[in-house]
Amino acid sequence: MKVLVLIRPKQGILDPQGQTVERALPALGFEGVTDVRIGRLVELEVTDPSKLDELCEQLLANTLIEDFEIQIQED
Amino acid sequence: MKVLVLIRPKQGILDPQGQTVERALPALGFEGVTDVRIGRLVELEVTDPSKLDELCEQLLANTLIEDFEIQIQED
Amino acid sequence: MSEQQAESLPGVDRAVELGLTKPEYARIVELIAREPNEVELAMFSLLWSEHCAYKHSKKVLRRLPTEGDRLLMGVGENAGAVEVAGLAVAFKVESHNHPSAVEPFQGAATGVGGILRDVIALGARPIAMLNSLRFGHPSSPRSRWLLDRAVAGIGHYGNSIGVATVGGEIHFDPSYESNCLINAMCVGIADPDRLMRCAATGVGNRVILFGALTGRDGIGGASVLASAELGDDDADKRPTVQIGDPFAEKKVLEASLELIDADLLVALQDLGAAGLTSSASEMAAQGGVGLDIDVANVPLREQGMEPFEIMVSESQERMLAIVEPSKVAAVLEVCERWELLASDIGEVTEGDRMRILVGDNVVGDIPVTTLVDDCPLYDLAPAPPEHGLYPAPPADLPEEADHRDTLIALLSGANIASRRPVFQQYDQIVQARTVRRPDEADAAVLALPVGENGIRPAIAVSIDGNARRVAANPEGGALEAVLECAANLACVGAEPLGLTNCLNFGNPEKPHVAWQLINSVEGIAVGCEALGIPVVGGNVSLYNEGPDGPILPTPVIGMVGEMPDATKTSSSGFLTDGQAVALVGPFSPNLVSSELAARRGQAPQGELPSLDISAVIAAHHAVRDGVRSGAIQTAHDISEGGLGVALAECTAVAGIGCDVTLPEFTDAALFGESPGQGFVIAGDAAAIAAIPGARVVGTTGGGNLVVSAEDGASFSVPVAEVQAARDGGLTAYLP
Amino acid sequence: MRIGVVRFPGSCDEVDALDACAMVADAELLWHGRTDLDGVDAVVVPGGFSYGDYLRPGAIARFSPVMKAVADFAAEGGPVLGICNGFQVLCEAGLLPGALLTNSGLRFLCKQVDIIVERPGTPWTADCEAGERLSIPVKHMSGRWHADEATVAELEAEGRIVFRYAPGDNPNGSTSDVAGVCSAAGNVVGLMPHPEHAVDALTGSADGLKLFSSILNGGDRVGTAG
Ligand SMILES: Nc1ncnc2c1ncn2[C@@H]1O[C@H](COP(=O)(O)OP(=O)(O)O)[C@@H](O)[C@H]1O
Ligand SMILES: [Mg+2]
């Protein structure tokens, strides 16, 4: 099955990349955009979803600094 | 409203990160995972969603090598 | 066959779509006595392209001297090499201009990857990278974006692979606005007895492809695929931007060197532009053999690739090796340990056929020589322009500005300001041999292993070009660029051994561009002859034009020099108070095509003063010997911005002022240029006075840069202001 | 005394680290695929871009077979030094506290900085004095050390901040100017600056040599906790 893993910087962790994008926006003509956070997206095919949590915790995300969310897309 | 932008390497474009992770997985004890693609995730708050497409094309994604998908989360 | 007859051939339109001319197609048909099939035509279209066949430059390049006492490997191999302290020092510069204009990060990154592979193919370990960059003025947002992304891409690749980026140059001019230049140079070292050649030899030997998977990557392949009549739903079959994978290249590097060390290879060649087509054909041509390549054995990243797509793919991080059958297993084992794919894709054959197979099916069969050597070479039709070719840039520095304000404006200008915001994005020190980093001296100094005498020898490397002077006078400007590179080496105590060059020009079919190209090559040749060094290799990038015409003619010179003792070198800045400051060299500065002229809105044209080469080289020797003996502790060549800027730079580096008195106090004397011909030096007073030709003009020290005329006029700038002006110039554009 | 320097695919500074170690002791490379440490007395996890820094620096390398052996060795009090990417690997492996985030300037940065020794007496700082300033280069893209407030307070209290950037020299936005930390027992030390690139005045500075020479005095498999 196809799986999407969304990985975001934890609340409270400075995200300079998000901040830089946010600051650049008005000058580029995009108003009213706030709370920009930049994370990672991992897409994969797995045969056995039971190990997904472990995969995310141990490898795909560093839970000290990142939260992850698993979205199972299809069978 | 809260918006998620999923940015993925385009089909056919080399994704060295995804490839490297995929090749490493069996040795790390994770079997049966294929088609790993690694992209970026941008989360933002917008007041006016009409300009989102333009924002993604011009700034958030590099459309030469990346595709993007906009997910509107809530109002 | 006449052109008319050629025009009636069924395949001619396809050939023209792929970039061949009708007469070229007719010639192909005549040579192989039939029309080429799809695979063959794709291969011809690449190998007979300007990029691979050098059809507009090959005759011109014959003017360059290519022989030298210390030459180990010259033009025709993947890179050149000279002998230093018992080692082979390999080096080459190459352009990646067009891909970088499309996607600057990946374009620049894969440019670095490409030139690295050329040096690796020789069996050399890359030890240093340099680069030469040209953009439109950074006040243009597009140019700023190109600069920012290209620099990030260069750093990404070089840093990740563990090769220090130790030098380079950046210049901004409106002529590069839509056609930036990204030239990268790589330097490597090898055991001279183990240098690899690219010639395939030994009938029956196997052809092994190793490294990354093959996909539909490639700019060169674009012309081929663009004409494949793809439907809308075939979007996934279009050629794609090449993405660099420095991690894969690092493994390719280590595996290649290990394979050579273990004596497992007959020949090695990188895959660059034109992919498998070019590397296989060149290996066969060099060895005078034929090759069978079975594309069914090429590991693919994408499904459904056609044979011609596999042959033209420009996927990065791949190498082609010729291996004796008994050693194939060992080769595959080394690749596997480095987690690299490796496949046996063919065989060296008797005769001279390049055969492409899919299993047992022959899908292409052409004589190697026809592919590699029979492309027509064109004569250029040079004509000097009757008036200047380039428009005057916008003026931003009034003629009335006084010397002090002019100096500050020049120092803080994007073309002269400190490159720190760029070079601090590069790992300058990995491999632990960088004795002089960027901004510490005029050339980078790289220590070599300790010699038998217990002393560590070194090499010095530099890359340079001054396109505005070349625009004014192609021969004189190119000669100055060679001298400037040599001057940089002299400043650190090095003696030039060899030169590489990248010739970046517009469309050579235009008479004025042809004139620029031919005369620039003449200038490089004259410089090499005067220095007694060969050209060991290089690259040509033509058709660099924007809607407003050609780029400035931009020959870029890379040079490697030798130093017997790494500890005997100099700094480009003043080091302590109370040292004598002197000028050396027969330099006759003028404002033609200078940075000041550009800032004043003057076009790059006018007469360059003639120069006395033997006097210039005598000055180089005096500086080099003075540095080696320890008499000279600071040495800096006088280049862009002239003597005023050179003195300010000496002051800025360590924040030590100076007080000098000059015989002339005109704009030309202070800010005029004569690249490669003059030096500012400093050291102990008695020692400096003994340097042949040195004219002592003042002393170091104090909190100000004080410049006076013999008639009493003078100006003074606090050191902190000099530093702030110089530091801020580029930072403003790379926050 | 024999020091082992781990080599992952993508390591770049392993040979420089090896040469630095060889200035004070015997030294050898340890291929990432091996499951033992060949009986070495100390381990250096070097800098570079193991696995291309793909996914996250250190994320893949920490699963290498050799890292299991390194973890066991560390648990027994064996001295381990992580430099730059090696520091990132040790943090990912949980052998050191915190994580390393992208530099606040978002760019790779290579420059000489001054660091201050906060904790002498670890096996890797035995030759340093408290408050000593060392001139050592940094070169990294992800060197912003981060830990939550409680962890930082705990490390401060336990004297586990080993190095700090000198005031004004923090190149990456690290919390509390932290340049290097150690494990609770003190035997595992990690830092972002590259001491192996500061072992010879010819190439810039020799201040970093102290970290390697320390191992002769403080490092012989003795945990020097607290
Ligand atoms: N401007 C030049 N000066 C001297 N040699 C050159 C120049 N341009 C190309 N060459 C030489 O011509 C050969 C072919 O160059 P190129 O096609 O760029 O090689 P590669 O395919 O290895 O990149 C090389 O040996 C190169 O050094
Ligand atoms: Mg080559």
Image (cartoon, coloured by chain):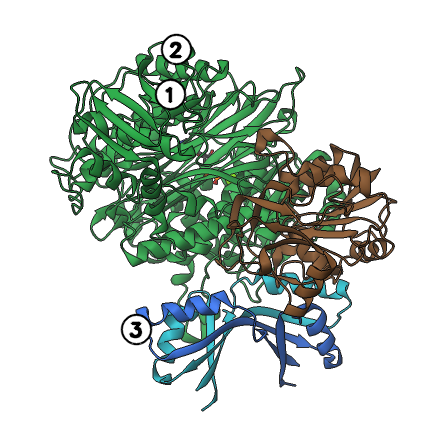
Chain colours: A blue, B cyan, C green, D brown
- Look at the numbered disc 2 and give the secondary structure of its residue: loop
Work out whether residue C323 can be spotted: no
Q: Say which element carries label 1.
A: strand
Q: Looking at the rendering, which quadrant does residue D74 occupy?
A: bottom right
Q: Identify residue for label 2.
A: C691
Residue in front for this viewpoint, B20 or C647: C647
In the image, is residue C701 above or below residue D87?
above
- Residue C681 badge: 1
C-alpha span from label 3 to label 2: 61 Å
Q: Is residue D187 left or right of residue D163?
A: right
Mark with earlier residue (1, 2): 1
Q: Is label 1 on the same chain as label 2?
A: yes
Q: Are marks 1 and 2 in contact (CB under 8 Å)?
A: yes
Q: Nearer the viewer, residue C708 or C352?
A: C708
Question: Which amino acid lies under the numbered mark 3 shown in the image of this protein?
Answer: Gly
Q: Nearer the viewer, mark 3 or mark 2?
A: 2
Q: Closer to the camera, D161 or C393?
A: D161
Q: Give the image location of residue C567, x and y in percent.
A: 56, 22
For label 3, the SS is loop
Chain name for mark 2: C
Q: Residues within 10 Å of mark 3 (few under 14, many from 20)?
A: few
| Rendered location of residue C395, percent (x, y) | 16, 45
Say which amino acid is labelled 1: Ile
Q: CA distance from mark 1 to mark 3?
A: 52 Å
Q: Nearer the viewer, residue C352 or A9?
A: A9
User: Is there one chain holding both mark 1 and mark 3?
Assistant: no
Q: Which mark is residue A29?
A: 3
On the image, which quarter does residue C297 sit in?
bottom right
Q: Amino acid at mark 2?
A: Ile
